[in-house]
Structure formats: C-alpha cells, structure tokens
Image: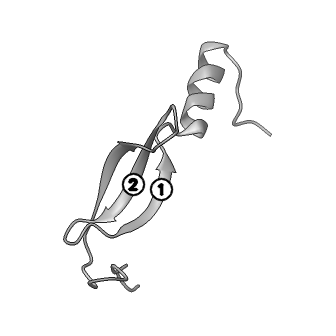
Amino acid sequence: MQKSKCPKCENDSFELVQTKLKNSYQDYNIVQCDKCGCVITVLEHYNIGDLLQILASKLKIDINSK
C-alpha cells in the first residue's frame, strides 16, 4: 500500500491541529502536512459516533445489535 503524501511538498507525515474557523461557534480539527502546513482536510472536533455511543451507554441502549 502506498503512503499518503502531501500534494504540495510530497512529505508523508501529517498532524492534527485543533482550530476555530471564522464565524463558527465550534472547534474543528485540521489534518495538515507537518512539514509545510498544507491543509489536507477539516474535521469536526467532536466525533458524533463516539458521542452517540457514550449517550446510548448511559441510557443503557445497545446500538450495536441489529
């Protein structure tokens, strides 16, 4: 399998940086090249799937059964 590379500098190492976006009330995570800072993608700070799993657990609901 090929390693992912930065489209700008071809570096193959990335970092996750938490940031606020202008005119937004919530935090976001940016995946960026750790060498040149080229932004690869922007993700929500909170993982909704994890939050739902925690909530279901507290409510004693098994969301994994089909």
Which scheme is used to colour this image of the protein?
one colour
- Determine the CA span between mark 1 and mark 2: 5 Å
Q: Where is residue 19 in the image (x, y as percent from the top left)?
A: 36, 43
Secondary element under disc 2, as helix, strand or loop, is strand
Amino acid under label 1? Val
| Among the two numbered marks 1 and 2 on one chain, the one whose residue lies closer to the N terminus | 2
Disc 1 target residue = 42
Query: Vertical placement of 14 versus 66: above or below?
Result: below
**Count of residue discs:** 2
Q: Which of 58 and 62 is in front in this view?
A: 58
Split into 4 quadrants, where in the image is the N terminus? Answer: bottom left
Question: Position of 36 compared to 59: left or right?
Answer: left
Disc 2 target residue = 30
Query: Vertical placement of 59 versus 45: above or below?
Result: above
Please report the residue visible at 60 percent of the width from the left and 14 percent of the height from the top.
58
Query: Vertical placement of 14 versus 46: above or below?
Result: below
Please report the residue visible at 71 percent of the width from the left and 21 percent of the height from the top.
61
Query: Vertical placement of 51 versus 44: above or below?
Result: above
Q: Where is residue 9 in the image (x, y as percent from the top left)?
A: 26, 84
Residue lying furthest right = 66
Residue 35 falls in image quadrant: bottom left
Residue 30 falls in image quadrant: bottom left
Classify mark 1: residues with Cα within 10 Å, few (<14), some (14-19) or many (20+).
some
Classify mark 2: residues with Cα within 10 Å, few (<14), some (14-19) or many (20+).
many
Question: Position of 60 compared to 47: left or right?
Answer: right
Secondary element under disc 1, as helix, strand or loop, is strand
Residue lying furthest top = 59
Amino acid under label 2? Ile
Is the Cβ of the residue at disc 1 closer than 8 Å to that at disc 2? Answer: yes
Q: Nearer the viewer, residue 48 or 58?
A: 48
